Image: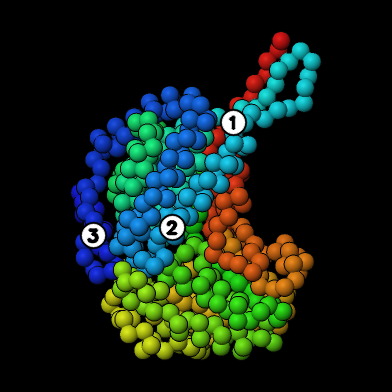
Amino acid sequence: MGNAKNLKVISPVDGSIYVEREFATSKQVDETFVRAVEAFQDWRLMGFEDRVEICESLVDYFDANQDSIAKEITWQMGRPIKFSAGEARGVVERSRAMIAIARGKLKDIPVPAQQGFKRYIQRVPVGVVFSMTPWNYPFLTAVNTVVPAVLAGNTVVMKASAQTPLTAEIFADAFREADLPANVFQYLHLNHAATERVLKEAPINYVGFTGSVEGGASVERALAGRFLGLGLELGGKDPAYVRADAPVEQTAVNLVDGAFFNSGQSCCGIERIYVQRKIFNQFVEAFVAEVNNYKLDDPTLPDTTLGPMVRVSAAEFVREQVKEAVSKGAKALIDENRFEHSKKGTPYLAPQVLVNVNHSMSVMMEESFGPVVGIMPVDSDEEAVRLMNDSHYGLTASIWTQDLEAAEQLGHDIQTGTVFMNRCDYLDPYLSWTGVKNTGRGCSLSEIGYEHLTRPKSFHLKL
C-alpha cells in the first residue's frame, strides 16, 4: 500500500493510483489522542438529544451524497457502481435504528426501591474509542462502532483500511457539516508500526476491529495487559443448508446473491452450501444458471454485476483454492470463458461453483473471501448440522425451508452468532452482531452493542 511515509491506494478497477496520503507522524498521532481525551471531557456531558441531533444530521449527509460516496467505494475497492450506493443507504438505515435503540438503552437502570436510599445504575461512556475498519464494506462496518460510540458520549479516532482511506475522511466531512464539536471524531492514516504503538500506548478505552483472524490476534497481542474493552469481528466461512421443502428456484437465486455479491468479499457471505440429496441436482442446475447471468466487467459501468476482487493476490488465492479442490476430485461447473474479462495476473476473476467437494479441501474449510462456493449433498438434518459446525468460524448460518419449527430447532444446534431462515448476508441493526470460535468476540449493533461502549456506574445514596 505504500512506503514508510506514504499510503497509496491501487484501484482494482484499472490498476491506477487512486489515492495517495502521507501516514501520520508520531507527533501527529500523539496530538490526535490528546485532543480526543480533552474533547471527551465536554462531549460526555452533552445532552443526549443534542447528540442525537448531530447524528441525525450525519444521516442526512449520507442520504444526500449517495452518488459521490458510491463512486469512492467503487474506485477504492471495486464494487460495481450499480450496487455501491446501497452502502450509503445502509448507513442511513442502520444509523436511524441505532438512534432509536439508544433512546431506551442509554437511560439509567432502576433497581428495586429501598426506604432511605436512592439507588440506580448509570451508563457512562467509556472514553476514547479507537475504530479500525476494513475495506470490503468500508462504511457499513465503520458505522457499527462510530455512530453508537458518539451517541453514547465517547470520542472516536478512526483508522480506515489502507485500501479505503477516504472512508474516514468522508465521515469527518459528514460530522463537520453536522456541527459535531471539534475533535469528538478524528481519523488517522497509520502504517502497521504506528497502529501497534497506538494499541500499546495511546490513551484509548475501547478498540473495535474488523478484519482477518491474524489481524485480530495481532490486536490482542498489542493490547495484552491493558484491560481495555475490545470487539473483534474476524473471519467467516458461512454455511447454508437447503432442506428438501425449500422452493428450489427462489432459494438458488438468493444464495447466488449471498455467495457472489461484492465478488464474495463479505465476512457473512455464503461460502459453502449443503443441500438435501433429493433436490441436489435440481438446485445445482438452478444455481449455475443464475451464476451464468452475472456480468464480470469494469465496475464503473452501469450494467456490471460482478467487479474485480480488491487486489491480484486475493484473486490468485481463490484460483489456488479452486485448483487444489479440482486436484482432489472436485468438479468446476462454470466455464471461465463465459467471463471474458477474467484474466490471471489481474483482480478480475470469474465466479466458480464446485461440486464433488468435501471437507479435506481448503475451499470448504478456509475463508475464501472471493467468488467461489462449494455445494455438497446431505442425507439428513443431522448430517447438515455436523458439517456446518465443522469449521473454525461461526458468524452466520442460513437454513432454507418452509418449516419454521425445524429451522428454529436446527438453529439451536448450529455454532454461530446469527441464524437466518430464508435469507442470508444481512445485518439487522436490532439484532446483535457477534460470532463464535475464530470469528472473534464482543458484539456490535442491537442494545447489547451499547454495553460495550459504555460502562456501568452505580449510585448508592443514603438519604
- In the image, what residue type sits under mark 3? Tyr
Q: Is residue 425 visible?
A: yes
- The image quadrant where one finds the C terminus is top right
Furthest toward the top, the residue is 463
Give the distance between the C-alpha atoms of the residues marked 3 and 2, in whole angstroms.
20 Å
Report the residue marked by disc 3.
18
Report the residue marked by disc 1.
123
The vertical placement of 179 against 247, above or below, is above
- In the image, what residue type sits under mark 1? Arg
- In the image, what residue type sits under mark 2? Glu
Q: Give x and y (percent) for residue 361.
A: 51, 79
Q: Give x and y (percent) for residue 262.
A: 43, 68
Q: Residues within 10 Å of mark 3 (few under 14, many from 20)?
A: some
N-terminal of the two: label 1 or label 3? 3
Q: Give x and y (percent) for residue 202.
A: 37, 35
Give the distance between the C-alpha atoms of the residues marked 2 and 1, in whole angstroms.
31 Å
At 61% from the left and 89% from the top, the residue drawn is 281
The quadrant holding residue 414 is bottom right
Q: Is residue 252 left or right of residue 150?
A: right
Comparing labels 1 and 3, the label whose residue is closer to the camera: 3
Determine whether the residue tagged by mark 3 lies in a helix, strand or loop.
strand
Q: Are marks 3 and 2 in contact (CB under 8 Å)?
A: no
Q: Is residue 209 left or right of residue 428?
A: left
At 74% from the left and 67% from the top, the residue drawn is 404
